Structure formats: C-alpha cells, structure tokens
Image (cartoon, rainbow, N blue to C red):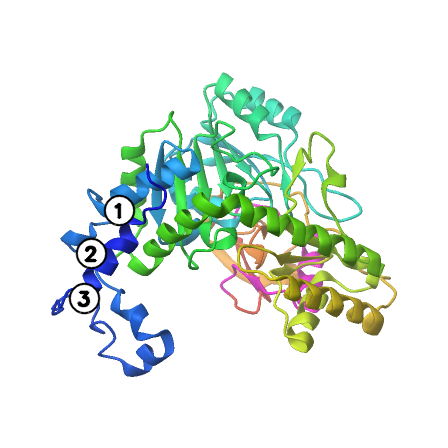
Amino acid sequence: MNQRKAPIYEALLRLKSMRIVPFDVPGHKRGRGNEELAEFLGRKCLEVDVNSMKPLDNLCHPVSVIKEAEELAAEAFGAEHAFFMVGGTTSAVQSMILSVVKNGDEIILPRNVHRSVINALVLCGAVPVYVNPETNERLGISLGMKVSEVERAIKEHPNAKAVVVNNPTYYGICSDIKSIVKLAHDNKMLVLADEAHGTHFYFGNGLPVAAIHAGADIAAVSMHKSGGSLTQSSFLLTGKNVNADYVRQVINLTQTTSGSYLLMSSLDLSRRNLAQNGGAIYENIKAMVGYAREEINEIGDYYAYGKELINGDSVFDFDETKLSIHTLDTGLAGIEVYDILRDEYDIQTEFGDMGNLLAYISVGDREKDIERLISALSEIRRRYKREKTGMLDTEYISPKVMTTPQKAFYADKVQIPLSKCADKVCAEFVMCYPPGIPILAPGELITPEIINYISYAKEKGCTLLGTEDLETNLINVIV
C-alpha cells in the first residue's frame, strides 16, 4: 500500500472545499455557534470537527476511507488488522481483554498492570492470575515477568485463556515477550500486550521487539504518547489468530458512535509520518536521551538508568528512549523533583513517584529543551539536596488477593478511615496517577505496609485517585 496516503485527512480536506450547509451535529456548526471556542481552538480545527456522513465513513462500520486508513495502519505496524480507537488506550486495553475472556475465565497477568486492565476484569468477571514481578532493590521499581514464573503460572492454571504482557513498563523495562508468546501458544493461550508506551518499537531501529512482531495476538498501542497523535487516540492491533470482526463487535459495545474526526485524522497523519520518517525520528530521540542520561549521571546523586539493567530475564531488554531518573540519593522523592521542576522551572515531566522521575522524550522534543532539563536538575540538587533518612524506597508492594475484582467492586461495602483499614479487603482502587498502576485493586487485602505507603504518598504530594473519597482519607472495604 502507499504509506504516503492519509485517507481520513484527505477526505476532510475534500469536505472543507465544498460549500455544505450543516443541518447535522455537532451543534457548533463548524465553529459559528461559539466564537469563544473558535477563537480558543482555531476555526480550522472546528471546521473539521464533524459527524459521520457517507463521504467520511463510519467508525463503527467502516467501508471506505476509515477502512482504507485501517488497512494502511495495519500494514505500517505489521498487523493483520488495526482499529482506530478514540477512547484512549484505556478503551483499547479493555476491548482487548473483553475480546478474549468472560465471566469465570482465568487470565495470567503481571500485577503492575495499568488500572484499565483490572477495570476490564471488573466489567467481565474474569479471574486474574497474577505473576508478581521482581523489584529492583536499588531503584524500588517493579521489573518484567520472568519466563519461568509465566511457565509456572501456565502449569498451575492450564485453562487460562491468555497472558498479558507490559511491553514496556512505564520505566522502560521489557519482558522476554518472544519466549512468553511461544510458551502461551504452545499451551493454546493468546498473548495480549499493553503497548501504551511502545508505539516507537514498530518504527525505530535497535529498539526492543514490538509485540505484534514477536507474535502477540492483540496489542493496545498508545499512538498519542510516543507517536505524536492527539491525546486520547490509539490503535488496537490484532494478529492472525484473532477474529477481527468479533473484536470490532466488542469495541462497539463501549466505544462512542460519534467518533472524533480530529482524533482519527491525527492517527492517520501520525501513522503516515512514522511510516515514512520513523527510523530517523527515533534515532534522533535515542541520541537525545543518551546524551541526557550521560549528563544527568555526571551531576551526581541522580541515576538515569539504561541498558545496564538488562539481566536476560526480568529485564530482558530496555527502551533507550525512556529517560527514567532515580532521585532518592538527592534526598528528594521523584514527586518532589517533579513538583519543583514544574513550579520553579516551568518544566513539566511525565510523572514523579516515590523514588523516580520520568521525562518523556518523543517526536516533538528539541535539544535545547533537553539542555534546560539537565541544567534544572543540576540546580535542584545544589539547592535542595538533603539526607534521605526516613524515605520510602520502593514503588511496588505485592498484593494478597482475597477475591476477584468484580466480586469486590460490587460487594456490600462501607467507608472507613484509611488508618483503620488494616486486614480489611479493599472494594475500590487506590493509585498514584500517573502512572495509574494500582497500589490496591478491588479484592486485595489492605496491610499496614500499604497503609503506610498511601500515607507517605499523600505526604509527598502524589496525586491519588480511584477512591470515592476524593481526599483518599476513607477507603471502601467489603463488609
């Protein structure tokens, strides 16, 4: 196929050239109905914020320009099929899970998954079989899944329907996905990949293997993160072992019937850009991150980690485009460095947690911005360095699962103060966001260690969400 084409974008250009009088939705009528909105977003933007019509196809049942755009995306990613997702990668992940498991089915997954995976289990009633990842003691971060642990889980749960893999984790850690695919397929199980942070694997050289290229059956790919499309736009990719027509039916259970052409055209144009220029783009990104990593490590006390973490198993590979920085030796939690960078230096990083900071480098970054970040980190160390006595040094606490997420979420429950929750079973989520990995998920035992962790996260200024109580002072527990 001709990867220079962008069918949805081209169809919108044709529409703009026509003098069509709109008696359909949206009600702003190409921006005329809200001058303030048109001024803020730009009239050119609102002129193509349109509804489905014959010349523009329909996201729920594509037969023309969206269908062609899907075929171009599938070819670009090396998949059998690609679906345009306008509900974010959360929607893609949930559709991926719901396409494979139903009530009572077992599914093998790492516990350090994004909330969207466990949300899907709440919806469908599938039973998680957790492979608890190892933790890097120095960095306090969870690693990938050991192949031996996946093999053990498969032997103990031979009727499981699928294995979920993070490819990569938020911090850039990759499991041995090729070996996991072989294990799963040998045991008649599918492999589902959360590739929210792995779009670039499909287009860059010398990067970890992309899930679909490794033989995974379905992958949720967050194009808006490292691929350059608009926020909330993603792809869901499927392989040859999956009935794509059924997957579309599952997607249509929850995805909007009013697909945003702004989001779809951004996916179309970003796919075209990466298909033509991705190799050069990601070589440049690797070079910028490599330079930043070296310079930050020269400052002292910070540790910007990379491929030296690879051990061939729980860290099978590392994504060199990730600028993950351990901050605890400065005496500052990652979230504290995150806040100082934003509040005092006008630098917005992706997230900070208990001990680490992530600066997301992608298609739109510039060398001068990298220099500004390095300079700010150096100055923060000089101004704020202190003893690290009393600081928590881990991001991951292995949970004790007492019941399934669905049973816990819908159980009779009561709100009690966090301090009195020890030995109770949680009936909701508690997580820092970003990264959106649950500290507690429905059905898990609340331990004194977890209570201490949540209290510490609040004290350090982490954004906590998932609870009905917006202050996270009260937790819903099973009666």
First reached walking from the N terminus: tag 2 or tag 3: 3
Q: Amino acid at mark 2?
A: Ser
Amino acid type at circle 1 is Ile
In the displayed structure, 31 sits above or below 387; it is below
Give the secondary structure at mark 3: loop
Residue 167, horizontal then vertical, whole percent: 56, 39
Query: Of 331 and 155, which appears nearest the observer?
Result: 331
Was residue 78 drawn as part of the magenta stretch in this picture? no
Nearer the viewer's eye, disc 1 or disc 3? 1
Measured Cα–Cα span from mark 2 to mark 1: 11 Å
Q: Which mark is residue 119?
A: none
Q: Which residue is mark 1?
A: 66
Q: CA distance from mark 2 to mark 3?
A: 9 Å
Q: Nearer the viewer, residue 320 or 315?
A: 320
Location of residue 323 in the rendering, given as x and y in whole percent from the top left corner: 67, 53
Question: Which residues are the magenta region?
Answer: 442-468
Q: Earlier in the sequence, mark 1 or mark 3?
A: 3
Q: Nearer the viewer, mark 2 or mark 1?
A: 1
Evaluate whether residue 88 shows in this view: yes
Q: Is residue 76 above or below residue 255?
A: above
Quadrant assignment for the N terminus: top left
- Residue on which disc 3 sits: 25
Marked residue nearer the N-terminal end (2 or 1): 2
Q: Say few, some or many: other residues with alpha carbon within 10 Å of mark 2 (under 14 / 14 to 19 / 20 or more).
A: some
In reply to whether residue 463 is colored magenta, the answer given is: yes
Q: Secondary structure at mark 1?
A: helix
Crowd rating for badge 3 (residues with CA inside 10 Å; few <14, some 14–19, many 20+):
few
**Picture disc at residue 52:** 2
